[in-house]
Amino acid sequence: MNKFINNPDNITSELLEGYTMAYKDFVKLGGENIVVRAQPKSEDKVAIVTLGGSGHEPALSGFVGEGMLDCSVVGDIFAAPGAQRLFQALQMFKRDAGILLVVLNHSGDVMSANMATQLAERSGIKVVKLLTCDDISAGLDTPEEDRRGLAGCVPLFKIIGAAAEEGCSIEEIYRIGKKFIDGTATLAVAMKGCTHPQNGATIACLPEGVMEIGMGQHGEGGQGGQQPLVSADATAEVMINQLMKKVKPAAGDKVTLIINGVGATTHMELSIIYRKAAMMLEAAGVNVVSGRIAEILTVQEQAGFQMILAKLDDEQERLLKYVPSNAPYWTTLGNCGR
Amino acid sequence: MEKLTIDDFKKMLRVAMTNITAREEEFSKLDAVTGDGDHGTAIVTAFRAVCEGAESGSEFKSMLNDMGFNVMMKTSGSTSTLLGGFFLGMSDNAAGTELDAEGVKAMFKGGVEGVKKNTKAMPGDKTMMDALVPAVDAICACPSADIRQVMDAGAKAALAGAEATVAMKANFGRARNYGEKSIGYADSGATSWSCMFASFAEAIG
């Protein structure tokens, strides 16, 4: 295993220290493996909190900042944080306006979130959970509880974070967020596996010249199966067609398209993939009003990407594009960036 | 036995802790058939946290609440979630320093509701629900005002429920992937939960 690390047990705490040192104007540590804003949001506004394992940087702590998250609660590599740490964070953000807790659908995260919210409710803390389940690799008709939460949570953070910043009620933010989730689909493809940085285990070993569509963000297989590696255009075409079948954008509908590199795939390749997917959408008369090519949620040195397609209404488009954010890994200038 | 006191309840917990610890390896071996083989360790660790939560308790509602809180805060994993939900649910349905048979029935009924908040597993899925649900059904259906008889009915039903999982095919969680291979072995969770109910009855018997 070739990685620049120190003691494997200290990876999570050390990476969070480095991150908060680099972006100290925006974020700081609020407790052990808890990242919060440097300048807290006023207490009359809803707080947005999320949780997840480390090893996916910049997710999820990279999206803490004004206009996005208030707090990310971080577990060890690929592991959910315990209910205790999450409960500690919920106590920190206790407020009459309430806390919206965004949970990516992975069993460990869901379990910790369920426990912590039960304990919070018994302690008089108002928490509403919002579950993301954007992965469509298990099939288009798979029930929500069997679909994983992938990088589609990141544009969600932007939209609901903006709504919270503008002072929307928790019910209103939940409605906006749920509508976004219902119109979002993500599909992942991998062509080279990665190693677990703590135990060196090989995750998702793929032979040369083979790709797997539907790979999860811990390298776990989907149901797309392994297939011979094909060109960027051919890969993009297969994936965007699947996503369009799920999201069903009609001609004239607005969407955002995001290509998220998962670690070892170059921005050069990601851009070529974006080009084809956007062209396919435009050919179908779909209005791609927002796009992004970036590494927002990675899987160590895995090669591949996640393609995210999400429908936007006028309100979501405004919240996504024109409300400012200073989160270190999703900075939006606001109206002057138009 | 007409009244269950805090001391009686703490004795039930102590006996359960002892019996569960004694059978740790057996629970792990059963879990290894369709899982990662750690149920023995998980239930011992989680039940210890339950007992620690009860230590300073002197009243049912707050003591049960502390027990559920402690296990959920100090340990993680599905065993912890389910035990935590069980005792939090019991806390919502019990109060005071002693319970009569009706109070005991209401408390355990609340426990099942608390577990249901934390799992979608149903009886027949080959999980701990196959011991818990019949146990609490039997507790609630027992016409006696003698808490010994009530708890004895629960213990017998839990044991029968756990034994019935031998013939079942796993239908929940990761174990579901093992399909037919899961037949012929009792479910580890149903077995450990039946051990808990048997211990409760033994402690006041």
Image (cartoon, rainbow, N blue to C red):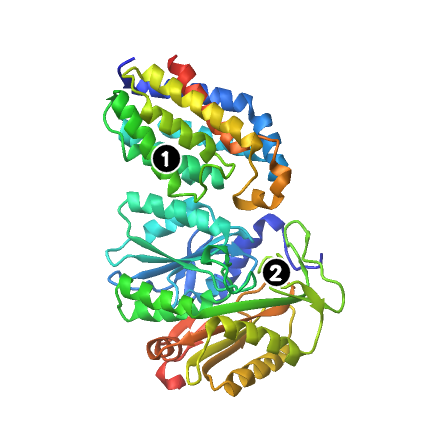
Residue at image position (51%, 82%) is: A281
Residue A334 on image: x %, y %: 37, 80
- Tell whether A243 sits left or right of A65: right
Q: Which mark is residue A223?
A: 2
Q: Determine whether the residue tagged by mark 1 lies in a helix, strand or loop.
A: helix
Between A61 and B59, the one nearer to me in the picture: B59
Q: Chain of mark 1?
A: B
Place residue B158 in its image quadrant.
Answer: top left
Q: Determine whether the residue tagged by mark 2 lies in a helix, strand or loop.
A: loop
Between A65 and A174, the one nearer to me in the picture: A174
Residue B63 on image: x %, y %: 31, 29
Q: Circle 1: is it few (<14), some (14-19), or many (20+) Cα within 10 Å? A: many
For the N terminus of chain B, the image quarter is top left
- Tell whether A264 sits left or right of B153: right
Any part of residue A263 in sight: no
The residue where tag 1 is placed is B112
- Tell whether A228 sits left or right of B120: right
Q: Amino acid at mark 2?
A: Gln
Q: Are marks 1 and 2 on the same chain?
A: no
